[in-house]
Image (cartoon, rainbow, N blue to C red):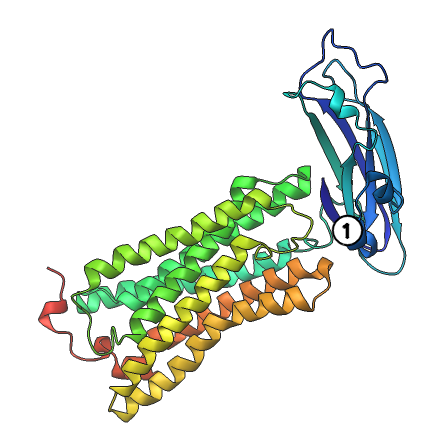
Amino acid sequence: MTKFAIAPGKGEFQTRLQLNKGLGKTKVPNGLNMSVFVYLDDDWDKVRSLETCEEKAQYSKLSKTIQVPLDGSWSDFSTGFLNQKLRTHVWFFVLADCNNTLSQLPKANRVNWELEVFNSDGSHFSQEEHGMISPLLIVLTVIVGFFITNSIKFYKFYRTEESLDYPTLIITVSLFLELLSLVFQISHYWIFSIDGKGSTIFSFAGQALGIASQFLITCLLLLMAYGWSIKFFRFEEMDLVIPLGIVLGLMHIFIVGLGRVNDDESYRYHNYENWAGMMVMGLRVLLFGFWLYLYRETYKSTGKESEKSFFGQFGVLSSLYFMAVPAVVFFATMVVAPYWRHKFVTAGTLLLQTLTLIIFTLLFTTKSNKYYQISMKGKTILPSNKLA
């Protein structure tokens, strides 16, 4: 049914069942009884390896038998309490039919279930997501500040030079997407704190916009590794590059959307711990390989010492950007305790994304840095770069 991490203390759950369609005149001699088993994280892997329902039932720390009404109405709520004294535990809730009573139902029928779980402090939040709103609000405030600052710098450059500062524009749009991502994530958590369900749309939108923001920065780094904005502004392949970038970006978001089909699988503790997350990480590593190829070719053709100095700094920061998130995800999956993985990955990737946006903002928009000194926007703007 689901999993839920409960902090030391006493957690509570209540559940009820319902037939999707009432049976009408269909008779079920022995009634329709279902069981809810609750397993501790220490036993879960062993339980999954067992063959029979009876064997699995022996490891349940708490069992509830629920009689499902045959007329299609909801059963009464069944309530249970879960205690943990020493540390946080992840509890797994399973709906079981050891007596094979479902075989008596018409094939088109099914059992619906509702399950509400409360942490030891009475909140709807699993310990994996507990306390996430405040840090997200702090990061949102920082992102808003840099977005406003970048927007002002972009506008001033446009008014002064009558041309678009494309790197600043890309970073500003990325900041805006990250800003929207945080707004949707915070809204999802706020709704979840009220009803224990949250908003699937807000949750997906927050994750998708975050991926889009990361991908936009990736495109900027690939273009700059090719020499764009430093050696040239326009190149013949632009008509091919832009559609290709849009397709790859939509592919990232599409993969994330498909991955939400198994969003609540028992093995998944963070956004990247499924096939979709692994594909996104794989694409990120492949794009890093492509970036490295472009970077090496451009660096070899760079003769000026000032450009070499900038590209050395740019190479280190870009490499960290590409590989930091996969490193965080890999470390969390292999080392971090399950009930800490979501916080670790969410906080880690968000912190890295925010720091990257801030560093690149300072790198590309401050007149005293190396980029401004060697880039085309720091030189005399050619008439071909003016807006008509």
Please count the marks in the image.
Answer: 1
> Along the horizontal axis of the image, is 5 left or right of 372?
right
On the question of residue 153 being in view, the answer is no
Q: In which quarter of the image is residue 146?
A: bottom left
Q: In which quarter of the image is residue 299?
A: bottom left
Q: Which of 247 and 78 is in front in this view?
A: 247
Residue farthest toward the front in the current orientation of the protein? 51
Q: Which residue is rendered at x = 21% and y = 62% of the image?
A: 238
On the question of residue 58 being in view, the answer is yes
Quick one: quadrant of the N terminus?
A: top right
Q: Where is residue 202 in the image (x, y as percent from the top left)?
A: 53, 43
Quick one: quadrant of the C terminus?
A: bottom left
In the image, residue 131 above or below residue 325: above
Amino acid type, label 1: Ser
Q: Where is residue 386 in the image (x, y as percent from the top left)?
A: 13, 66
> Along the horizontal axis of the image, is 296 left or right of 41?
left
> Along the horizontal axis of the image, is 211 left or right of 138?
left
Q: Which residue is rendered at x = 80% and y = 34% of the image?
A: 14
Q: Position of residue 128 (x, y in %)?
A: 70, 55
In the image, residue 232 above or below residue 304: above
Q: Which of 277 and 159 is in front in this view?
A: 277
Q: Nearer the viewer, residue 349 or 30?
A: 30
In the image, residue 65 above or below residue 173: above
In the picture of the structure, the residue carrying the numbered disc 1 is: 49
Residue farthest toward the bottom in the current orientation of the protein? 305
Q: Which residue is rendered at x = 33% and y = 63% of the image?
A: 170
The residue tagged with tag 1: helix, strand or loop? helix
Q: Position of residue 198 (x, y in %)?
A: 61, 41
* Badge 1: residue crowd in 10 Å (few <14, some 14–19, many ≥20): few
